[in-house]
Amino acid sequence: MSEVESKQQLGSKYSLQVDCTSALNFVLQQNSVPLIRQILISSIDNITDSKVILRSNPEYFKAHTIHIANLAANQVLALDKPKLVFDIKLLQELPENIKGRIEAVWVNEKGEVLAEQQVEIDLLTIDTWGGERQPIELLASFSQPNAAALSPVLVKASEILKNKQSGSLTGYLERDRDAVLSQLNALWESLLQQQIHYIVSPASFVKAGQRVRLAKQVFEEKLACCLDSTLLLSALAEQIGLDTLVIIEERHAYLGVWLNETPNADLIIDDIQLLRKRYDLGEIVFIETTLITQQAKFISALETAKQYIKDESRQNEFYLAIDVRQSRLRGIKPIAAYLEKRNHLDETEIEWASASIPVYDIERPIENKTTRVDRWLRRLLDLSLRNKLLNFKDNRYSIPLQCSELTLSKLEDALANQEGFLFKSTESISLKDVQRDNESQHIDQYVDESLSRKLLFSPLETPLLEKRLIEVYRASRTALEEGGANTLFLAIGFLEWKESERSKRTFKAPLLLIPVQITRETAKTGYRLFIYDDEPRFNSTLLQLLRQDFELDIAGLNPLPTDESGVDVNQIL
């Protein structure tokens, strides 16, 4: 049998398929977006001790081997997101966009090739945005608020505000729409002094992407296309604390700036009607940034971009808008953050503080016999496993919330200050159609940072979350109207316990119970969580169980310790 015939016979028995992105650059790698999403292998025979070897040409990642102990006949095995080690220096210093290749080879224990595939990809320079060839959200990485080249422009803008006695570069601190517009106007006037000239964008920059002139290059070459000027002004606005939107049309780009901090904006807005409504409500302004190259006044830039949004004939040209602030919350960092060293951060500032474990005073009773009073208390409090305060189980009348130990006390403080929270699902946090390597870390960070924007996140998927919100809202309202008692609580902290050391069953009991209520103004506004006019309480039923069955008497919880805003959650836990 010839070598060609042998390979054809093997090819019919074994299959290998590689699913990967079509373009790779430094930005994709630094944002933990996997280059290879999945490898599928299958065989009509049982295969033992085989391996898949991954190589690249040029060698932008080290050769990687995946060992497969056993593959059953006719089984399709999915190898998800292999951990590749990239050549960071090559990705940072690549001078031009070039063609690259991924080689995947599946071999058996004898080293014979069972199947192989080669995939061509584009290797992009560090300043190239990949367009639709990569997750579109990565465009936010090219807005560089920390770039050193911005400093002279920011200083000049500050001087302009000072001379006009119009405040300073304070972002949203003044909570005034006019103050935000004054700051944007000052940034605009300082950019006019840079004498930047216009250069046309590539015709198909949305699909194929383009090389972006970053801030330093714009100021040195005095050239900028629409995307360059939009990202430049976005970086300046972001540096002073303003939230921006990069608006992308088929052949054009311009900027949007929120006039107030927005708690409930989507990362990607693909419906121009939503932008129009936000504009009509006075929540956002739009800026035609290329007018910087024509020495136009700021008001002209506002009016021109307004026409883009309002003009029905341009509606088909609208592609999408990317919220830069929302991208930052999801872990998409600016390029400059990777290239500059963290010189001004003490080591103690980036270390996690060790958890403080409270010391409980334990008093053991002299007698271990159950008294008559104990029996009454047991019957009165229902210390059986039917009680949800001792044996809590997730059901349709409960909504799990995701919140780290670092922010539990902040949540209770905000509720105690009569602040309300909207509900969202954590599935809305992930990038569109992308599963990053460290996704859970980005989700945790986003959840914690969104607390200040009055958002609570549940791990439930959106349809199930909405269904449970309706159930909880109706049940709690009915109980309040018919029985006059509030039955809805926010449970902070749970104790896992067993009836004995040998018991296999583990039960969960809530610790701190905060009385809350859920309100709903309209179907569009969604459900909002507020504190109810009642005192927080510790699970007294659990304390009684611990006292009677485990001889544990935990002191210091009656009354509950307090702080400046409600109870002291950290001390209680």
Image: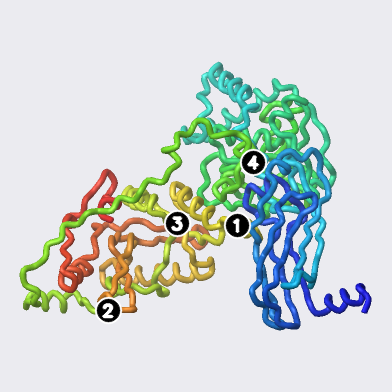
Q: Which residue is mark 4?
A: 256
The answer to whether the residues at label 2 and label 3 have Cβ atoms under 8 Å apart is no
The answer to whether the residues at label 3 and label 1 have Cβ atoms under 8 Å apart is no
Q: Upstream in the sequence, badge 2 or badge 1? A: 2
Q: Which residue is mark 3?
A: 456
Query: For the point 50% across and 63% down, which residue is it?
Result: 523
Q: Which residue is mark 2?
A: 385
SS assignment at label 1: loop
Is any part of residue 76 visible from this angle? Answer: yes
Which numbered mark, 3 or 1, is in the foreground of this view? 1
Classed neighbour count for the residue bearing mark 2: other residues with Cα under 10 Å, few (<14), some (14–19), many (≥20): few
Q: Amino acid at mark 2?
A: Leu
Q: Upstream in the sequence, badge 4 or badge 1? A: 4
Classed neighbour count for the residue bearing mark 4: other residues with Cα under 10 Å, few (<14), some (14–19), many (≥20): many
Q: Which residue is mark 1?
A: 437
Q: Amino acid at mark 1?
A: Asp
Relative to 522, is 292 on the left or the right?
right
> In front: 457, or 483?
457
Tell me the quarter of the picture where residue 471 sits. Answer: bottom left
SS assignment at label 4: strand
The answer to whether the residues at label 2 and label 4 have Cβ atoms under 8 Å apart is no
* Residue at the outermost top position: 163
Query: For the point 72% across and 66% down, which residue is it?
Result: 52
Relative to 362, is 69 on the left or the right?
right
Q: Amino acid at mark 4?
A: Gly
- Residue 132, position in %: x, y? 75, 53
Q: Which quadrant holds the N terminus?
A: bottom right
